[in-house]
Image (cartoon, rainbow, N blue to C red):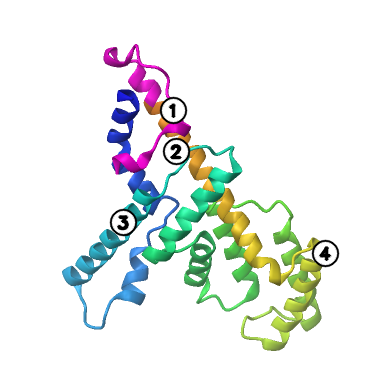
Amino acid sequence: MAFSSRLLSRSKQLYGSQAILNQQHAFPVRYYAKEAAPAGLKGDEMLKDIFRDIKQKFETAIGVLRKEKITIDPENPAAVSHYAKVMKTIREKAGLFSESQRIQFTIEEETQDIPDARTFFLKLQEIRTKRGLSDELGVEAMTMDALEKVEKEIKQPLMRNDKKGMALLMAEFDKVNKKLGVRREDLPKYEEELELKIAKAQLEELKKDAVEAMETQRKREEFKNEKEVDVRSLDIRNFL
């Protein structure tokens, strides 16, 4: 018991930080500067407001984590699902982005001044690569094929403000989606699946960190005779 208590006591700040900031849960500072700063707010005042807001979000997250038992078991679907629900509760109460919302914000931020469709899709590829997202179905290639077809038909580069041309492209995308078996009404399901994958990855990282920390502690003289602790038995609530 002393072993697990010592481990969690030393790790509580790191875990709390991961819960609210891991995977870039915090808004970028530019978001506050452009969207959240009241008119006339400058310098130190804006920074104080930003840090106050981050502190409030952090405290909200810790408040939720104190009430929920997190089981560090990434191979247990029930534990992964519960963890995902807890993270969703934290996002909703603290006003944080989901992964899909973060991606959408990044896309809007980085593509708002791009006038043509080709450069837009190339930027999407860049964003996907930077975020470590895979393209297992080859959607990007199909997207560019659809764009090539439309530009060949209209005999010029497709601009994003070309309503008629974009309508043609959307029609091509509908064909691609049908081929892939993707339906717009299923998008919430895909988002949920993405959040479950993220939850599992985060639990795997927490398990790895906990195991490494315990192995390091066991090498110390005072813990040589301690029994090995199953990470699934750890209750982080007691140490937040």
- Note whether 25 is above or below 6 in the view shown: below
Judge the density around disc 2: few (<14), some (14-19), many (≥20) Cα neighbours within 10 Å: some
Foreground mark, 4 or 1, reads 1
Looking at the image, tell me whether mark 2 or mark 3 is earlier in sequence order.
3
Residue range in magenta is 214-240
> Badge 2 is on which residue?
206
Sequence-first tag of 4 and 1: 4
Query: Label 1 vs label 2: CA separation?
Result: 9 Å
Mark 2 belongs to which amino acid?
Leu
In this view, 11 is above or below 19: above
Q: CA distance from mark 4 to mark 2?
A: 38 Å
| Alpha-carbon span between mark 3 and mark 4 | 44 Å
Q: Nearer the viewer, residue 65 or 194?
A: 65
Which of the numbered marks, if any, corresponds to residue 179?
Answer: 4
Q: Quadrant of the C terminus?
A: top left
- Badge 1 vs badge 3, beta-carbon distance below 8 Å: no
**Tag 3's secondary structure?**
helix
Query: Do residues under tags 4 and 1 come within 8 Å of each other at their CB atoms?
Result: no
Q: Quadrant of residue 219?
A: top left
Q: Which mark is residue 211?
A: 1
